[in-house]
Image: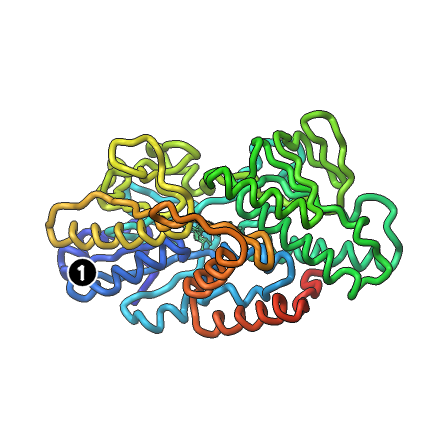
Amino acid sequence: VSVVDAPGSARAGAAAATGSARVVILGAGFAGLSACEALAAGADAAGLEIVIVDRHTYNTFQPLLYQVATAGLNPGDIAYPVRAFLRRHPSVSFRQGAVTGVDLARREVVFEGDGPPLAYDYLVIATGAMTNFFGVVGAREHSLAIYTMEDAIAVRDRVARSMERAATFGVSGGELTVVLVGGGPTGVEMAGTLAELRSLDLAMTYPGIRPDEARIVLVERQDHLLDGFQAKSASYALRALRRRGVEVRLSSAVMEVGPDHVVLEDGEKIACGTVVWSAGVTTGRLAERLDVAKVQGGRLEVTPALQLTGHPEVFVAGDVAGARREQGSSALVPQLAQPALQEGRHAARQLLRLRRGLPLEPFRYRDKGIMATIGRRAAVAELPGGLRLSGTPAWLAWLGLHLVFLLGFRNRVAVLLNWAWRYVWWRRGTRVIAGT
Ligand SMILES: Cc1cc2nc3c(=O)[nH]c(=O)nc-3n(C[C@H](O)[C@H](O)[C@H](O)COP(=O)(O)OP(=O)(O)OC[C@H]3O[C@@H](n4cnc5c(N)ncnc54)[C@H](O)[C@@H]3O)c2cc1C
């Protein structure tokens, strides 16, 4: 399969002549891979050639990124090579590259320094989201995001390096203090895990550092944690974090981030060595550059069948899609893994229906619940039908579901081993500084 066309090549003509058509999927995340899987199942019958494009050669299991950032898991444990996925789907090919634009009129995907444009007959945009710094002074320069594998490794390296320095030279200020901005699931999970790292691992590995020298501060703009969860789950998380010694600042916002401090809304300055920004998401630059209708958060406006408004040959799925929770409602589907999987599958099925000349069906989101973990035997889960769990049952449900959804048997075994190592024996095995 050739995945490179000369600029301006007439894909539509080729498709008409041979009866074949090319589908290009942008993004090998939850939505892109689920679209790919559903398309591959009907590709031969529909005469489709499928090309999946991603800047990385692997899929990242984002829900466990914070465990890489806190040295509980290795990066490879939550990365799944796209080419391993292709082994099961010979009708699909892969092109690595950073997409900088889509020429919707010429039906071409444009790359920056990654080869010539790629023509398509149908396109699935599933490029996800990225960190939103909300224009806070110094946030982009001085805080660390947690959205990609590189981000997670950078956080892990920063924390490990500051501990090594403190063990060698002593603590003079706030260099061991970690400030987490944003009290959503990622901030809560990071804070809980860092608190466990401090209380159980610090004394063993760095006997010279006092635990109170390593503060963990979680700053949240709203008056509660875990927005979107029920009040009982939010207050459980707050209690569990405070019990673990996390300083939770509610109704407080970070107004400025410097190289060694943050400044809060009330003027308080907190000296710190690491700032992790998990306060919000926006769509990436690719979506920003597209001159099409957008909805809240810059998400691309789509029809009920998930087609890009005004472009029936383009489907959109996952975090980048502005799909509605219910048709006619203004609320959007949450930017989570389950909706992304469902949208990817739906977009693929509608593309196949379009190809066969069948009427398209609207997307219907099936809410499968939400969960967040605070640490060992402490989690909250809200399941369909109003069932709410907390503590050990929620934690076990969280562990089980994450194992089930992780891609690749090898990864599941590796994660299970690392969790056993950590939660049963309280040992941490992956704290190496990978950067220079
Ligand atoms: C730290 C963190 C924790 C999370 N925890 C949970 C959780 O516990 N439960 C839950 O349900 N959800 C969680 N989420 C959200 C969930 O991971 C996302 O909703 C989901 O990944 C969205 O899937 P997607 O396919 O739309 O995007 P992604 O999975 O982000 O995939 C997008 C893909 O597109 C590629 N890409 C993007 N731009 C380009 C470009 N210009 N060129 C080439 N390739 C590009 C990226 O490399 C990536 O592989 C979490 C997210 C984060 C960041």
* Left or right of residue 85: residue 257: right
* Left or right of residue 201: residue 130: left
Residue at left offset 42%, top offset 35%:
298
Q: Is residue 127 visible?
A: no
The quadrant of the rendering that contains the N terminus is bottom left
* Left or right of residue 171: residue 120: left
Q: Is residue 222 visible?
A: yes
* Left or right of residue 382: residue 124: left
The residue closer to the viewer here, 379 or 81, is: 379
Please tell me whether mark 1 sits on a helix, a strand or a loop. loop
Residue at left offset 36%, top offset 41%:
333
Q: Quadrant of residue 187?
A: top right
Q: Vertical placement of 19 versus 225: above or below? A: below
Mark 1: amino acid: Ser
Q: Vertical placement of 406 versus 23: above or below? A: below
User: Does the Cβ of the disc 1 residue fall within 8 Å of ligand 1?
Assistant: no
Across and down, in percent, residue 300 comes to 35, 38
Across and down, in percent, residue 284 comes to 46, 42
The residue closer to the viewer here, 65 or 392, is: 392
Across and down, in percent, residue 385 comes to 34, 47
Across and down, in percent, residue 204 comes to 78, 65
Residue matched to label 1: 20
